[in-house]
Image (tube, coloured by chain):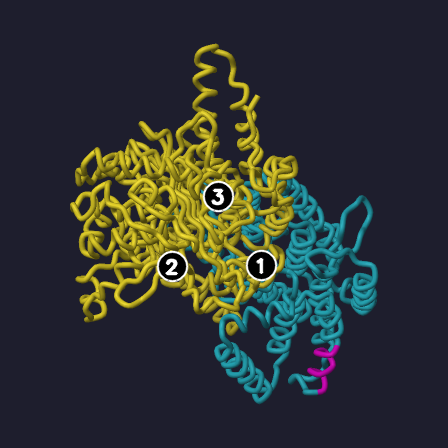
Amino acid sequence: MAFFQYAAVAIFLFLITGFWSLQVENPQIYNEQAERNRVKSLPIPAPRGKILDRDGRVIVDNHSSYSLILTRENLKTEHLRTIAGGLNLDYEDLLQRVNRYTARPKYDPVIVKEELTPGDLSFVEAHRDFFPEMELIHAQRRLYPQNGFAAHVIGYTGEISEQELDEPDFARHNPGDVVGKFGIERQYNDSLMGVDGDRQVVVDNRGKTREVLAAKDAVPGKDLQLTLDLDLQAVAELAMEGKNGAVVALDPRSGEVLAMVSRPTFDPNKFAVRIKSSDWKEIADNPDHPLLNRVIQAQQAPGSTFKPFVAMSGLESGSIDDQFTVHCAGGASFYGHYYHCHLKTGHGAVSLHKGIAQSCDVYFYNVGNRTGIDKIAFYATQAGFGQKTGIDLPHEAEGVVPSSEWKIRNFRQKWYAGETISVAIGQGALTVTPLQLARAYMWLINGGLWHQPHLVKGGKYQDHSWPVSPDNVQKVIYGTWGVVNEGGTGVRAQLPGLDVCGKTGSSQVASNEFTRGKNSKELKDNAWFVGFAPRQAPEIVVAAFYEHGVHGQFAAPIVRDVLKAYFDKKARLAANAATRKPTGAETKIGSLLHFALPTPPERSEPHRAPAIEAALISSDDEEAEAPASRPLP
Amino acid sequence: MSRHLTPRDLDWTLLVISLVICGVGVLQIFSATRGTGWQDAWWKQIIYILAGLVLIWLTVIIDYHTLMHYVFILYGLSVIALLAVLLVGRQAFGSRRWIPVVGGFHLQVSEFVKLVIILLVARFLTDLKTEDLEARDMGKIAGLVAVPMALVMKQPDLGTALTYLPILVVGMFLAGMRRKYMTAMAAIVLLVLPVGWGVLKDYQKARLVSFLDPDRDPRGTGYQMIQSKIAVGAGGMWGKGVTKGSQTQLRFLPVPHTDFIFSAFAEEHGFVGVIVVLALYFVLIMQIVQNAQTAPDKAGMYICMGVAALLLFHVLVNVGMVVGRMPVTGIPLPLMSAGGSNVLSNFIMLGLVNNVRVRRFVN
């Protein structure tokens, strides 16, 4: 029996040493682990700031949603398959996400799924006991307008990518953060984002909060008021329905962007959380590049819309005066090459006013030839061509203003005088963005001054001034008035009771020799129109770029619709102010926009906003799509 | 004989120590189940303990020789009861262990079969006429024990099935097992098991146990083991105090009132508390061994040693599991863990020991 007693002593010593090593030698290690079990840090995500229009109407809102995170202290890889299955996630994707966090500290949770559906929530609730790593967090999600309304201005948010984490812009961010990726969301990410808070809570083994130890509230992101006018934006969107291209409206007195539309568009709601690869493929593979903001990224020859600046450089440099007249016989020869005018029968005797109003190419061939490329380039540069406008959007393109210096720098070749002839009618190597063109007209209107175009009120923006003769400006503007009002190329932009000025442009996509015999859409000319009004003290400049629209006259109605909407609204506001009545007509378009604005995703299945659809159906005029272009009651 | 019996004849040292351990258990059950679905468990435990005291007396009254006389009938009934469990038993945690008895109670038959095994081994070894234990007899008794063991394993309940082994092994040792068998068994135990166990990786051990005893532990044995070690370690030298252990109170510790009660106790009472209670268990077992030494005959000795072996094995496996030195098998800690069948069978065992004790001066 002694052996049994020895065995008992040995067994008890064996057990006591076990307690000794846990409780006496390493209590602090286990105490920490117990604390980590007990105390959890739950993030309180800061809601992003709303994006408002110039009147304070909400364009981008947030809505409440739940996200699922996995706490990594007690994460088990073998659970992932079941979790992925329960939440309809791809197992491999989930595994990769989890693995991506391995370098992070253990207390950083993995965000697994956002926008949980009621089904997901009940899965999580039912399985918490078995998968204690699952934790729900409440979050604010982005709600964007539907149908890609103003999508290129707003942009979208998404989970920060690995490359972005390395960029200085995103230095303060962590994996899993949702950041602005494009448009205003990207440009003003820091101010929109706010600072996440967190709560230190005592939880039980089911993750149920038993006690709150400390809480740091989230600092919500700042609301951002844009210069955009939803009424104008809506009209511009409708005017571009079914077309590819861009429209931008500026206030020439301030540089504020009132409307900005690029087509084709995309639905930022698809990006709001994590874009499905099928949706991404659809957008990325679209040959029309919906993600391109054509207002600031399309670099195209401006065509005849450039002519007023050629005229200005001729006048300012003294190469011509307003008496300078040429005879247009439908074309002219320069340097051994024959250049056509767009009017084969010829314009006859053409001076400055008629040259602009009728957009006579021969006249501008001569002006350009007299002025020379470098003077044209100088004034074009003063008007802002060839440089970014500095608008508060990412990824702006520069465009090209060719000059003899430019030619040498880029091609190590001498400038040929013949090339000037093409540039004089806005062709050749000259490329501009729609926004640059609008800015250049602002420069012209303001007598040699432009304000930095911008989308957010109250920022610090620069002006640029190269004073030009007011007399010359008036002469050129008079020409653009003729374009619209004297039976020129832009008559479709006419608005009764309003002095609309403007200029059409049709720019070749490829040389005419090349397009001969081909009729594909891709080779049709691009149509441009830039309009502004009223002539004496312009309040709004609208530039429209209608891709493959063939002729500038087809871009003119787009501009007309936006101009009309602007002045109708102004009259309405004045009338309302006078009678102090509740806004009548304004609420009509206001409610139209309200329907166009986001509804929570559960209910957003019919993708076209009802109001815009109704507006389209009710419009029987093929050209004047916008309801705003009809007389308002 | 029985008319001479008075409570004074009982082993009061044994009973007082047992009741102190039970008291610690009740306190810990109270602390660990506060505000949970099992918060009635502490007073139910008190009722079981009181019932256990009655059972001790009842067990003492019937002479253990009488009990041993009927042991094969008891054995037969046990096998039938275990078969019944497999056929009609109530299922919980994925295994069938309980059969319903009157009054809505459920009996864990395998707990009571332990007692029959103790008596069976005692009877079988007493009946041997030889000095040394022959291989043939070893085979016979092992075979007899193997039948209920297999039935319990089938439930499946590996932990409880294993508790039958130490009774057999200790009995065989005492019966004068030949040196070569002893060496052979020691070799098997000392070499094969630890080496085999050591070769396995942690998760394989966990899987092995989970495989033998599935569904008992849906979150994985590793999780339970880790939480238990955290609870014990966090207790430190002096413990966190009654109802203050976060591992216990926030239920990170699995089943803190039954299988892991000692872990909860260690968290709330620290190393000092652990030493006191382990000392109580040690004295308890030594007191039973002493009763074996003073037993009037071999049969009494085998019974006492069977009880001592069984209790020692329970303490080793349960407390070893709590500190992470034994796999998670889910056998209760005698006298402390909440549960009627466990308490009652423990008290009957104490009754058997007293049964032997009160007859030590007879003959």
Spatial CA span between label 1 and label 2: 62 Å
Q: Which residues are magenta?
A: B136-143
**Among the two numbered marks 1 and 3 on one chain, the one whose residue lies closer to the N terminus:** 1
* Protein chain holding label 2: A
**Among the two numbered marks 3 and 2 on one chain, the one whose residue lies closer to the N terminus:** 3
Spatial CA span between label 3 and label 2: 81 Å
- Say which colour chain A has: yellow
Q: Quadrant of residue A279?
A: bottom right
> Which mark is nearer the camera, 1 or 2?
2
- Give the residue at x 23% y 70%: A411
- Say which colour chain B has: cyan
Residue B257 x, y percent position in the rendering:
58, 49
> Which mark is nearer the camera, 3 or 2?
2
**Among the two numbered marks 1 and 2 on one chain, the one whose residue lies closer to the N terminus:** 1
Q: Is residue B140 magenta?
A: yes
Residue A99 x, y percent position in the rendering:
44, 64
Q: Evaluate whether label 1 is on the same chain as label 3.
A: yes
Residue B113 x, y percent position in the rendering:
73, 63
Nearer to me, B279 or B85: B85
Residue ID for mark 1? A89
Q: Which corner quadrant holds the N terminus of chain A?
A: bottom right
The three-letter amino acid code for the residue at tag 3 is: Val
Residue A340's disc number: 2
* Protein chain holding label 3: A
Q: Is residue A218 magenta?
A: no
Magenta region, main secondary structure: helix
Residue ID for mark 3? A203
Q: Secondary structure at mark 2?
A: strand
Task: Check the image and report above or below for A564 versus B271.
Answer: above
Q: Secondary structure at mark 3?
A: strand
